[in-house]
Image (cartoon, rainbow, N blue to C red):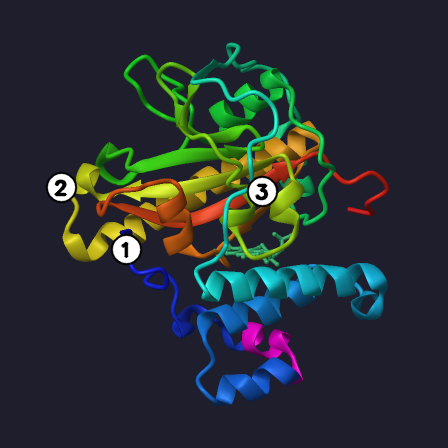
């Protein structure tokens, strides 16, 4: 079993502004000790549309129903993986990452944003390799990485949920190793788009690598490290014309079970990446 599924987030981190964002209906629930899931649901089902008129459109109605269905299944412990689509390979040797080019940093920062509409098309292997290297690859001969970690513990593992299986990113070999031969994408979050987007990343902290970090600091340090990786993914996505969104509204216990994680491994965040949906305004 993994760590408590709600240990990472509590109500204190939901700011007053976010509470206001949640809207009347959820705000009523808020007075009555809402669950973290209720807050995230209210927040992100509303946030995923940019125009409140869209909330009444068929598309957003379907989105809400799918998300609610997943939420109920999650509460019942019935959120199940899908069968693999495509060929699952034990190990995928990624092509050497292209470490030159891309948008100038300031332009990538200008374009960085969250998007929640994805085309289902798989990312070509070269793009996947470049993305993962940007996220958390080895960028120095001494094994240093593209994102920092306290005391260089490198405690974050990046899991990669693809339609053909769930893989662990081995940054030293620039390879993906098959962990679970199932399509775990739909397990990686309540929001409906995670099911069909080509790639969901899951950031997992391995507490065994944080022996030098005071116990009380481990979760916050690991979360900061995962946040740095997530921002690398945001900037790479902005540069490469991909859509992405970091997600905390996830069922950590379900993900940990599906990935067969140990007691020492803690699911922190998930992040969806893919090509923008054709015709999407963002
Ligand atoms: C810690 C964290 C958790 C988040 N969780 C979710 C989530 O579960 N679902 C989602 O759609 N967006 C999530 N987001 C994305 C935010 O909603 C988004 O960053 C915010 O609305 C600002 O939009 P921007 O990223 O386009 O600037 C999260 C962001 C952060 C930093």
90 and 50: which is toward the camera: 90
Q: Is residue 215 left or right of residue 4?
A: left
Q: Is residue 280 left or right of residue 104?
A: right
Give the magenta part as a residue range.
17-24
Q: Quadrant of residue 124?
A: top right
Q: Position of residue 131 (x, y in %)?
A: 55, 26
Secondary structure type for disc 2: loop
Q: Residue at x 49, y 73 (%)?
A: 15
Earlier in the chain: of badge 3 and badge 2, it is 2
How far apart are the alpha carbons under marks 1 and 2? 20 Å
Q: Tell me the tag on residue 3.
A: 1
How far apart are the alpha carbons under marks 3 and 2? 31 Å
Residue pointed to by mark 2: 212
Q: Quadrant of residue 276?
A: top right
Q: How many marks?
A: 3
Q: Residue at x 49, y 68 (%)?
A: 37
Residue pointed to by mark 3: 272
Q: Position of residue 78 (x, y in %)?
A: 48, 58
Q: Is residue 50 above or below residue 187?
A: below
How far apart are the alpha carbons under marks 1 and 3? 22 Å
Secondary structure type for disc 3: strand
Q: Position of residue 7 (x, y in %)?
A: 32, 63
């Amino acid at each position: 079993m993994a760590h408590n599924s709600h240990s990472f987030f509590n109500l204190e981190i939901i700011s007053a502004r976010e509470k206001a964002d949640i809207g009347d209906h959820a705000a009523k629930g808020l007075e009555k000790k809402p669950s973290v899931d209720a807050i995230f649901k209210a927040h992100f089902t509303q946030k995923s549309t940019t125009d409140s008129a869209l909330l009444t459109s068929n598309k957003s109605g379907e989105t809400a129903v799918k998300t609610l269905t997943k939420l109920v299944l999650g509460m019942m412990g019935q959120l199940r993986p899908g069968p693999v689509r495509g060929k699952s390979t034990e190990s995928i040797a990624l092509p050497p990452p292209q470490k030159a080019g891309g948008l100038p940093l300031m332009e990538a920062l200008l374009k960085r944003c969250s998007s929640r509409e994805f085309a289902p098309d798989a990312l070509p292997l070269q793009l996947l390799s470049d993305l993962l290297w940007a996220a958390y690859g080895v960028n120095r001969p001494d094994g240093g990485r593209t994102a920092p970690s306290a005391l260089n513990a490198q405690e974050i593992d990046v899991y990669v949920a693809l339609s053909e299986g769930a893989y662990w990113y081995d940054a030293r070999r620039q390879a993906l190793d098959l962990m679970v031969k199932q399509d775990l994408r739909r397990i990686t979050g309540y929001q409906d788009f995670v099911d069909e987007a080509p790639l969901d990343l899951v950031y997992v902290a391995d507490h065994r690598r944080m022996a030098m970090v005071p116990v009380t600091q481990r979760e916050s340090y690991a979360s900061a490290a995962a946040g740095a990786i997530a921002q690398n993914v945001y900037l790479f996505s902005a540069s490469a014309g991909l859509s992405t969104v970091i997600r905390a509204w996830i069922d950590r216990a379900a993900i940990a079970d599906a990935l067969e994680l140990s007691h020492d491994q803690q699911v922190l965040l998930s992040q969806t990446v893919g090509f923008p949906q054709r015709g999407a305004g963002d």
